Amino acid sequence: MALDQITDAVTQSNVKVLGEAPAMAMGSIYQTMAHSTGILFQNAVAAQQQQNTLAQAAANQGILQIYSMNTMAAAAGSEKIGQGGIADNLTSLLAVLQSFQR
Protein backbone atom coordinates (compact mmCIF):
# COMPACT_ATOMS: atom_id res chain seq x y z
CA MET A 1 0.00 0.00 0.00
CA ALA A 2 2.77 2.49 0.89
CA LEU A 3 4.61 1.56 -2.29
CA ASP A 4 1.52 2.40 -4.35
CA GLN A 5 1.25 5.80 -2.65
CA ILE A 6 4.93 6.56 -3.34
CA THR A 7 4.52 5.50 -6.98
CA ASP A 8 1.44 7.71 -7.33
CA ALA A 9 3.24 10.69 -5.78
CA VAL A 10 6.24 10.30 -8.10
CA THR A 11 3.97 9.87 -11.11
CA GLN A 12 1.98 12.99 -10.20
CA SER A 13 5.25 14.92 -9.75
CA ASN A 14 6.47 13.81 -13.17
CA VAL A 15 3.15 14.75 -14.76
CA LYS A 16 3.30 18.17 -13.08
CA VAL A 17 6.86 18.79 -14.39
CA LEU A 18 5.91 17.67 -17.88
CA GLY A 19 2.78 19.81 -17.80
CA GLU A 20 4.70 22.92 -16.74
CA ALA A 21 7.58 22.39 -19.22
CA PRO A 22 5.99 24.27 -22.18
CA ALA A 23 5.14 27.26 -19.99
CA MET A 24 8.67 27.33 -18.52
CA ALA A 25 10.18 27.11 -22.01
CA MET A 26 8.01 29.97 -23.26
CA GLY A 27 8.95 32.02 -20.20
CA SER A 28 12.63 31.44 -20.95
CA ILE A 29 12.12 32.42 -24.58
CA TYR A 30 10.30 35.62 -23.56
CA GLN A 31 13.10 36.52 -21.15
CA THR A 32 15.70 35.96 -23.87
CA MET A 33 13.74 38.08 -26.35
CA ALA A 34 13.34 40.88 -23.79
CA HIS A 35 17.06 40.81 -23.05
CA SER A 36 17.97 40.85 -26.74
CA THR A 37 15.59 43.75 -27.36
CA GLY A 38 17.15 45.67 -24.47
CA ILE A 39 20.63 45.17 -25.92
CA LEU A 40 19.33 46.25 -29.33
CA PHE A 41 18.03 49.52 -27.88
CA GLN A 42 21.23 50.08 -25.93
CA ASN A 43 23.25 49.70 -29.14
CA ALA A 44 20.91 52.09 -30.96
CA VAL A 45 21.31 54.73 -28.24
CA ALA A 46 25.10 54.31 -28.25
CA ALA A 47 25.19 54.74 -32.04
CA GLN A 48 23.05 57.88 -31.81
CA GLN A 49 25.35 59.31 -29.16
CA GLN A 50 28.40 58.65 -31.33
CA GLN A 51 26.70 60.24 -34.33
CA ASN A 52 25.86 63.27 -32.18
CA THR A 53 29.48 63.58 -31.10
CA LEU A 54 30.66 63.37 -34.71
CA ALA A 55 28.12 65.97 -35.81
CA GLN A 56 29.23 68.35 -33.06
CA ALA A 57 32.88 67.87 -34.00
CA ALA A 58 32.13 68.54 -37.67
CA ALA A 59 30.14 71.66 -36.82
CA ASN A 60 32.96 72.84 -34.57
CA GLN A 61 35.53 72.37 -37.32
CA GLY A 62 33.33 74.26 -39.77
CA ILE A 63 32.91 77.17 -37.38
CA LEU A 64 36.65 77.27 -36.70
CA GLN A 65 37.28 77.45 -40.44
CA ILE A 66 34.75 80.26 -40.82
CA TYR A 67 36.31 82.25 -37.96
CA SER A 68 39.84 81.77 -39.30
CA MET A 69 38.89 82.77 -42.87
CA ASN A 70 40.07 86.41 -42.51
CA THR A 71 43.32 85.36 -40.90
CA MET A 72 43.95 82.82 -43.62
CA ALA A 73 43.15 85.35 -46.35
CA ALA A 74 45.52 87.89 -44.81
CA ALA A 75 48.26 85.29 -44.52
CA ALA A 76 47.75 84.18 -48.13
CA GLY A 77 47.82 87.81 -49.29
CA SER A 78 50.99 88.49 -47.37
CA GLU A 79 52.59 85.43 -48.86
CA LYS A 80 51.63 86.47 -52.39
CA ILE A 81 53.04 89.93 -51.82
CA GLY A 82 56.23 88.54 -50.35
CA GLN A 83 56.79 85.93 -53.05
CA GLY A 84 54.99 87.37 -56.03
CA GLY A 85 57.50 90.01 -57.00
CA ILE A 86 55.09 92.89 -56.36
CA ALA A 87 57.98 95.15 -55.40
CA ASP A 88 59.67 94.42 -58.74
CA ASN A 89 56.46 95.19 -60.59
CA LEU A 90 56.09 98.49 -58.75
CA THR A 91 59.69 99.38 -59.53
CA SER A 92 59.14 98.63 -63.22
CA LEU A 93 55.95 100.69 -63.23
CA LEU A 94 57.81 103.60 -61.61
CA ALA A 95 60.56 103.36 -64.20
CA VAL A 96 58.00 103.43 -67.04
CA LEU A 97 56.22 106.42 -65.54
CA GLN A 98 59.51 108.28 -65.06
CA SER A 99 60.46 107.60 -68.67
CA PHE A 100 57.32 109.43 -69.83
CA GLN A 101 58.28 112.55 -67.84
CA ARG A 102 61.62 113.00 -69.66
Image (spheres, rainbow, N blue to C red):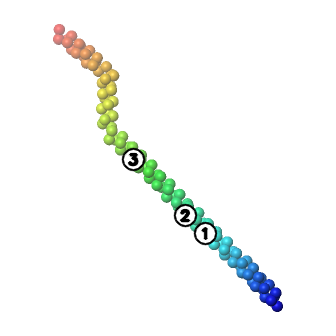
At label 3, which amino acid type do we have? Ala
Residue closer to the observer: 17 or 94: 17
- Looking at the image, is mark 2 or mark 1 earlier in the sequence? 1
Quarter of the figure with the C terminus: top left
The answer to whether residue 43 is left or right of residue 83 is: right
The answer to whether residue 31 is left or right of residue 6 is: left
Residue drawn at point x = 30 percent, y = 36 percent: 70
Q: CA distance from mark 2 to mark 3?
A: 32 Å
Residue closer to the observer: 2 or 12: 2
Q: CA distance from mark 1 to mark 3?
A: 42 Å
Q: Position of residue 55 (x, y in %)?
A: 43, 49
Q: Are marks 2 and 3 in contact (CB under 8 Å)?
A: no
At label 1, which amino acid type do we have? Gln
At label 2, which amino acid type do we have? Gly
**Would you name the residue on which mark 3 appears?**
59
The answer to whether residue 90 is left or right of residue 61 is: left
Q: Which element carries disc 2, helix, strand or loop?
A: helix
Q: Residue furthest front?
A: 2
Is 56 above or below relative to 12?
A: above
Q: Are marks 1 and 3 in contact (CB under 8 Å)?
A: no
Q: CA distance from mark 2 to mark 1?
A: 11 Å
Q: Position of residue 95 (x, y in %)?
A: 23, 13
Q: Position of residue 52 (x, y in %)?
A: 44, 53
**Residue 74 falls in which quadrant of the image?**
top left
Residue drawn at point x = 41 percent, y = 47 percent: 57
**Residue 9 falls in which quadrant of the image?**
bottom right
Quarter of the figure with the N terminus: bottom right
**Would you name the residue on which mark 2 appears?**
38
Q: Which mark is residue 31?
A: 1
